[in-house]
Image: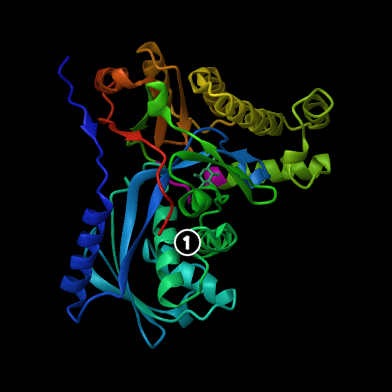
Amino acid sequence: MSTSVTWLGAWTPEQGSERVRRLFEARFGDGPADGTWSAPGRVNLIGEHTDYNGGLCLPIALPHRTYVALRRRDDDLVRLVSAQEPAGPREVRLADVAPGAVDGWAGYVVGVAWAMRAAGLPVGGFDVAVDSCVPYGAGLSSSAALEASAAVALDSVFGLGLAGSGDDEGRARLAAMCVRAENEIAGAPTGGMDQAASLRARAGHALLLDCLDGSVRHVPFDLAAHDLALLVVDTRAEHALVDGQYAARRASCEAAAARLGVATLREITVDPRGLEWALDKLDDEVQVRRVRHVVTEIDRVTWFVALLDAGEVDSVGPLMNASHASLRDDYEVSCRELDLVVSTALAAGALGARMTGGGFGGSAIALVRADAVDEVAKAVADAFADADLRAPAFLVATAQAPAA
Ligand code: GLA
């Protein structure tokens, strides 16, 4: 079959900066920006729907980044333009920012400024131009990349001093403000993994994030050294975190934790005295499955990291497959397209494959031999064409630097 394969390339930092610098000057027409900043999207290797349960997850920062050119103003007006939106600029007064008051992508940007001000930081108005090569709606955290790029830009122009490259504590604070922007201003009840990945990841490493205390460990992650590659498949299936499904999963976990008398499901260990006790105690069959996913998934992260530490990245495949099965059967957040990527990639020789991110569409990842990337991508594209599905898009993920 002659299905073509679409690759989603990333801009170089120079290309991205140049694009937003020009966009800023063309659309505002009154001089240059103070500077340009950028922040990556992310892909999660394992540990899905664990962040809001105080669990572990393991994202990497993508080469695909959102770029902003930003200039400080002396009033409280924010003017925003985007390469993806010909109209504009949009204008928002910071004093008017409140939950539900700002529609669409602008809410993620002004929401960060709002959260900074709520934390008592001296942030005022600004002009900002935005452009991005993070695929939109692909479950690769285009929203967190937008928040994090705004966060480091505002940190710089208002002299907050939180985003220094070695300052993880400052970056953790910025990530927390980005989460507030997303939860309260944009109205998506997400858990915090994406903002941590965008602001706190390290090039060449996966970010082991412990969502109970917010601590991180940088785990070396260099697939090329093992002749492996991480293929990301954007299924292009509908995916929206603001709809009720994500919130329903989260509520179900919180209800189960309350029933079990624990603060978070992290307290339930995978051994029989933990998990079996918990499952026996729950009388709601849906909660039983949700809890089983969360507890076993946290355990899989631990094993995955142990294999990375031991230099055995080529053995993580079965953990990825088990994660996918658990997300599909117990957590019920997969969909036909994601399942098709996983089954096709495995049949084409992938070592492991799973959906990544929130689910209900979005992207899946496959760990493949470096010389088999094209072949596996072609097999997936063919399978989608055979099934009459919209053509998927592909990228190869390597662990890149955080927002700066
Ligand atoms: C989305 C959310 C994250 C996380 C994942 C699932 O990406 O933004 O906080 O909950 O889903 O792991």
What are the residue bounds of the magenta stretch?
Answer: 239-246
Where residue 255 sits in the image (x, y, percent)? Answer: 73, 44
Q: Is residue 8 left or right of residue 249?
A: left
Secondary structure category for the residue under label 1: loop
Q: Quadrant of residue 279?
A: top right
* Quadrant of the snapshot with the C terminus: bottom left
Q: Is residue 223 left or right of residue 184?
A: left
Q: Main secondary structure of the magenta part?
A: loop
Q: Is residue 310 above or below residue 34?
A: above
Q: Residue at x 24, y 58 (%)?
A: 84
Residue 252 appearing in the image? yes
Q: Residue at x 51, y 81 (%)?
A: 122
Q: Residue at x 51, y 55 (%)?
A: 188
Count of marks, rendered view? 1
Q: Residue at x 55, y 77 (%)?
A: 121
Where residue 236 sits in the image (x, y, percent)? Answer: 32, 36
* Quadrant of the snapshot with the N terminus: top left
The foreground one among 29 and 285 is 29
The foreground one among 64 and 338 is 64
Where residue 44 sits in the image (x, y, percent)? Answer: 49, 38
Q: Per the image, is 401 magenta?
A: no
Q: Is residue 115 above or below residue 280?
A: below
Which class describes the residues within 10 Å of circle 1: few (<14), some (14-19), or many (20+)?
Answer: many
Q: Which colour scheme appears in the figure?
A: rainbow
Which residue does the numbered mark 1 point to in the structure image?
186
Q: Quadrant of residue 3?
A: top left
Q: Quadrant of residue 337?
A: top left
